[in-house]
Amino acid sequence: MLITDLIQETISAISANKVRSGLTILGIVIGIASVIAMISIGQGATGQIQASIEGLGSNLLTVMPGSMKTGVMMAGRGTAQALKEDDVNVLEPISGVIAVVPVNQRSFQVIAPNGKNTRTNVIGGSPEIFQVREISLESGSFFTENQVRNIERVAVLGKNVAEDLFGEEDSAGKMIRISGVNFKIIGVAAPKGGVMGVFFDDMVYVPITTMQKVLSRSEYISSILIKVEKKDLLSQVQQEAILALAQKHRVDPQDPDFSIISQEDILGALNQITNTMTIFLASIAAISLIVGGIGIMNMMLTSVTERTREIGLRKAIGAKNKEILAQFLSESVILTFLGGAVGILFGWLISIGISKFAGISTQVSLFSILLAFGVSSLIGIFFGYWPAQKAAKLNPIEALRYE
Amino acid sequence: MMEVKNITKVYKLGDVETKVLKGISFSISAGEFVSIIGPSGSGKSTLMHILGCLDTPTSGQYFFEGKNVSELSDDELADIRKKEIGFVFQAYNLLPRATVLRNVELSLIYAGVPKKEREEKAKKVLMASAFPQEFWYYFSNQLSGGMQQRVAIARALVNDPKLILADEPTGNLDSKTGDVVLNTLIDLNKKGHTLVVVTHELYVAQYAKRIISLKDGAIIEDASREKSKSLKIIKE
């Protein structure tokens, strides 16, 4: 039997019962569409998180007080007071390090002269923080080395803070009060956007000295950012920094009172979460795919019974068992394949709809499409095999006599 | 051409064994027109299934063109059915959703013959059996019973088989269309096809040159039409 004839026979068999075939296909369509849509949500989240983490600044290591084990954050960060500003001095000489920025971060009430106020994160840092965090300006300027040294009360606002306090008008040059102290706004940062934008556009940057002396009145710092020359050096610098800091703090490097995490670590932890979410969503969707597959099996069994005489006739005029098997198997595979194709289309539309109307970013990848196609044809083979074998094994005489 | 040697067929239903054929022997040479007659339950259908390579005997041997059929696999049997045997059934057994042409082509499809060649052969056969051309593209279920049986005969002929096996070919037809179908079969026999017709209808059997009469799974008479007593008994 030629392959073109096989396909022609299959199509004529499927189209002989359009409603039933259509309904059966619908089961697969729903299954595949939900798998595609669910995976697209998961992958969208992963992609967005990845972009945001990279937006934090590339080749960055963060030293935090407290310990951290295998990707899970332990101990309340910021509660432990283990890092001091002079820790920076032991980190700077490490080869491959471009910049070391001490950061002191705390939440304060910020009030504009017009009475509007917001509670937000205030970050004390050295001027390099803007370079390290890859923050650009929308207006005004960053604070300088001089302003840090002079403990000046100047601030750079994140875009959201500026909008919350002053609306659309340019806030550079205006005054605000942070925790009751007057600060002059010297610049507004350009928005970062993304999921992390919620976080980063909501910050106020001030010189670290001002933070320590005027706002938090504490020598301790909440974290240290280390900018590394290139990606390959990250883990090497990380190791050396752990040793150097442990030596300075006089603690065991195996169990230090601080932790150094790289973007990869954060990314890894977050990816773990999103992957779990993706798998969870996809498995729920996969259940509907299995239900769809059972629908295929049900239809094929009915079809084999209905066409018993036809099978007998085909055998009588010389069809071999494997040809009958191939015919019925190709019916179920083509059904699921059609369902897969339409399902991918629908899943795509659903994921576009989700990102448009629910604001969740989605991403349909070639991988998920190939996966859907692979899975749907596997389902066709898996759920179609038994009915097809039943057809192939029919005794031609009994089949011909079947009423 | 065909030789059966002492064949038996036993069906088992649980513990109960039913002996349908009890040691049957005969041979048919090429070009013969044989009618197998007998009352229902005589085993004539079972015999036809064995002759048609749809089934194998429980014991005994069946040689088709010198090949011992009882030793062949399912696939080899299918090959013989495809190339050497044309079946005509009482209930026509056409594919309802296919055109006349496609129905006739069917066994060529399983023989892997390319579309163009297939169509040519099918048209040739339909032409030869004087099947009206206007119906070639009708679906088979749009045709009358007599027309359907003629399509079935064309289908049986498309591979130019040595043997044509007809099982009650006129059983579902009125006598007038039955005659047309029967004459088509007789013509084929005259052209050299070996023809075996299984029937219980006297009027069909009397066209045959040789009559094998079965009763309770055994041959009670194997004689030419002129000498056949069974035919006379029924006639009287």
Image (cartoon, helix red, strand yellow):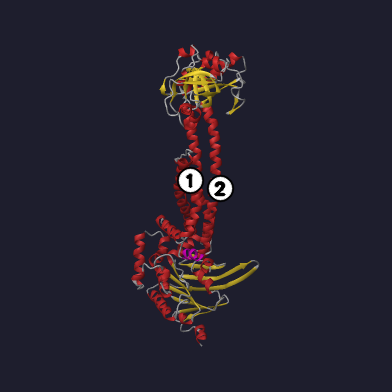
Q: Is residue A155 visible?
A: yes
Real-space CA distance between mark 2 and mark 1, rounded to the nearest whole angstrom: 14 Å
Between B141 and B76, the one nearer to me in the picture? B141
* Residue closer to the observer: A237 or A215: A215
Residue B54 in magenta stretch? no
| Viewer-nearest residue: A285 or A230 | A285
Q: Position of residue B104 (x, y in %)?
A: 40, 66
Q: Chain of mark 2?
A: A
Left or right for A291, reference A370? right
Evaluate whether residue B161 shows in this view. no
Q: How many marks?
A: 2
Residue pictured at 44% horizontal, 64% vertical: B82
Binning the other alpha carbons within 10 Å of mark 1 as few (below 14), some (14 to 19) or many (20 upward) gives many
Q: Which mark is residue A303?
A: none
Do the residues indicated by labels 2 and 1 lie within the same chain of the protein? yes
Q: Earlier in the sequence, mark 2 or mark 1?
A: 2
For label 1, the residue is A372
The range drawn in magenta is: A308-316
Instruction: Please tell me which residue is depicted at 47% across the width and 62% down the height of the picture.
Output: B78
- Percent from the top left, x then y, of residue B34? 46, 76
Which residue is labeled 2 in the image? A287
Q: Position of residue B73 (x, y in %)?
A: 51, 60
Pick the front one: A325 or A171: A171
Image quarter of residue B111? bottom left
The N terminus of chain A, quarter of image:
bottom left
Q: What amino acid type should be assigned to the residue bearing mark 1?
A: Ala
Q: Is residue A315 magenta-colored?
A: yes
| Residue B214 vertical position relative to residue A6 in the rendered view, above or below | below
* Secondary structure found at label 2: helix
Name the chain letter of the residue that bears numbered label 1: A
Magenta-drawn stretch, dominant element (helix, strand or loop): helix
Q: Foreground mark, 2 or 1?
A: 2
